[in-house]
Each structure stands twice: as structure tokens, then as C-alpha cells.
Amino acid sequence: MTRPVTVVFGGTGFVGAQLIRELVESGRPTRLVARRPEWPAWVEEGDPLTLFTADIRDADQITEALAGADAVVNATSLYVASRQVSFEDMHVTAAAELARQAHQAGIERFVQLSGIGTRLDSRSAYVRARARGESAVLDAMPKATIVRPSVIFGPDDAFLANLTALTRLPVIPLFGRGTQRLQPVHVVDVARAIVTLTARHRPRRYFFELGGADALDYREVLQLIMHHLGRQRPMVPIPFAVWHAVALGLGILPAPPLTRDQVILMQGDNRVTEGVGTFEDLGIRPRALRDSLPDCLPHPR
Ligand SMILES: NC(=O)c1ccc[n+]([C@@H]2O[C@H](COP(=O)([O-])OP(=O)(O)OC[C@H]3O[C@@H](n4cnc5c(N)ncnc54)[C@H](OP(=O)(O)O)[C@@H]3O)[C@@H](O)[C@H]2O)c1
């Protein structure tokens, strides 16, 4: 008899790729779905992994991708909207269609990845779309699990790579005064949480926020990185109005290195709130950024 599969939309992404690895290592039959799926470098013959090509915006392709599934994860992303694809298309319409079809197919385990700070009344179009997406997924599948991580780090991530690049400048420009609180979370811990949340005997909670062991100011994160790399640079507060102007200017690029939505996100804290499901409910002790830097950053010179 064929065992049911766990289907991961976005299985080649930063989070999705780690999740695929954790699922396969735990022996779960797994289907990696993306528009351009690729075999992970670590895969070995006999591993319970299959690839599937599908666009989450295509309802028929979703139907095919879900065949034989008993658990589904939406780990797709869209950080910069374009003329071809809007935040609404990806984060609301496509996410809801995936949840609707999963529900219709009798699949009970569904994880929608979102992010801490998601709010309907945000000034950011991205964040508002994420919030509408969460609601649309829950309308389609009331027992879907929403997982909101804080900023995620790991080897070869964008977060630490961008901050490391900043520490090469003679002076580091801060977002505002750099006092916003972050709770950076390791990608392996996020992946393990989702493995638990899609397991047959999962906890009876449906809303999680995932943060690492340390809550740190943005400037403390930069200091940790500089300390690790053996660098010392002055940090200069830059008003958010300036950052908004910079992001506006960069907006003409096809892949801007900074967007207005990211600036808005940097204006608030990004840490786990009260009354939500956390790593503790999953029996996972998350790592701290400071302990993980040696595994995630180049060795200091
Ligand atoms: N990275 C973070 O720090 C962070 C923090 C908090 C929350 N999150 C959330 O975690 C989720 C995953 O983020 P990520 O950073 O891992 O994303 P990512 O690295 O950008 O990966 C996105 C994945 O989605 C796939 N994808 C994109 N468009 C698709 C489409 N139309 N149809 C099917 N697949 C598509 C991509 O493959 P193809 O391009 O080949 O299709 C890729 O596998 C997102 O919901 C994000 O908001 C991330």
C-alpha cells in the first residue's frame, strides 16, 4: 500500500528546503513542489522524496500536486510584488485555494507559513496581504495551522548575509535608532516545528509564533556579528523617513535590495507575543543566535 505523502509547496526555498530535509530524515514520504523543483544535493537513492512541478496560482496544478497527500505545507513566498504577480494573488488567493482543495480532499494537516507582526491594519501592503491570507486560509480550512516565525537565520541565509555586508561599510547605518526587538530563529528549529505540526499526533493548537532563544535589539545583533567577525564599526542612527526615501528610489529596480514593506517591518518589534503556541508547546528548545553564529557565518580572519 502506498503511504500518504507530505506535500511542501515552496520546497526549494530557504525554509522549504530545510523542511524537506527534516521530513525525509524522519522517514516521511515527501513531495517537493515548486515551479522549478530541484533535487537537494544531500539526497540519496531510496530517500522517500519526489519532485513535482506546479505553480500555486494554478488550481489544476494544485489538484495534481495534492494527489495522495495527508499533510500540506505552504512555504511559498513573494516578497516583492510585480506586474505579473501581486501580493493578493500569492498570499491570499493562491493560499486560500490550496487550503480549500486540501480541505475538500479530506487532508487534515495544513500549515500556512506567515510571519510575526502580520496585521490587517499595517501600513505595509505586504503585511496586510499576509493577514488577509491567514484569514482566507482559515475560512477555507478552519483547522489549518498558522505558523508565524520571527526573522529566520541559518547557514547561507539572507538575514545574516545582509547584516554581514553592512559590517564591511566604514559606518553602519541603523534603521532608526536600531532599538527594535528581534527574536531571530534558526531555520532548523522552524523546520522541526513544522515536522511536528504536520505529524499524525500533532498538538491541538493551531496558531504558533516561533522565536529563537534570545530577544535582541537590532543593534545588538549587529554587535554580535561584528564581534564574531572581529570587526569594529561605528553605528549611526538614520531616521526612517530617509529609509523610506531610499526604498522608494530603489523601487524602480526589478529586484530591489530594500523595499518600503521591509522598512515598515523594521519600524516595529518582531518577537513572539503573549498567548500563542510556541516552541515550548512542541517540546523544542530553540537555539540562540549568539551560539549559532560560528555555524552560520564565515570563520573570522
Ligand atoms: N526567510 C525568513 O526570514 C522568513 C521569516 C518569517 C517568515 N517567513 C515565511 O516563510 C515562508 C517561506 O519563506 P522563504 O524565505 O523560505 O522563501 P524563499 O526562500 O523565497 O522560497 C520560496 C519558495 O516558493 C517557491 N515559489 C515561489 N513562487 C511560487 C509559485 N507561484 N508556485 C509554486 N512555488 C512557488 C519557490 O520556488 P520556485 O521559484 O521554483 O517556484 C521557492 O521554493 C514565507 O511565507 C515567508 O513569509 C520567512
Image: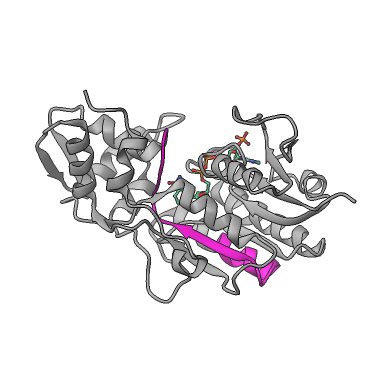
Res. 259 visible in picture: yes
Residue bounds of the magenta highlight: 132-156
Q: Nearer the viewer, residue 151 or 300?
A: 300
Q: Residue at x 17, y 38 (%)?
A: 227
Whether residue 118 appears in magenta in the rendering, the answer is: no
**Residue sitting farthest toward the top:** 301
In percent of width and height, residue 270 lies at: 34, 58
Q: Residue at x 53, y 38 (%)?
A: 82
**Above or below — where is 129 with respect to 171?**
below
In percent of width and height, residue 262 lies at: 36, 47
Whether residue 152 appears in magenta in the rendering, the answer is: yes
| Relative side of 58 to 296, left or right | right
| Relative side of 185 to 2, left or right | left
In percent of width and height, residue 245 lies at: 27, 41
Res. 113 visible in picture: no
Q: Nearer the viewer, residue 111 or 54?
A: 111
Q: Quadrant of residue 99?
A: bottom right
**Residue sitting farthest toward the right:** 1
Q: Quarter containing ligand 1?
A: top right
**Above or below — where is 80 with respect to 28?**
above
**Residue sitting farthest toward the bottom:** 275
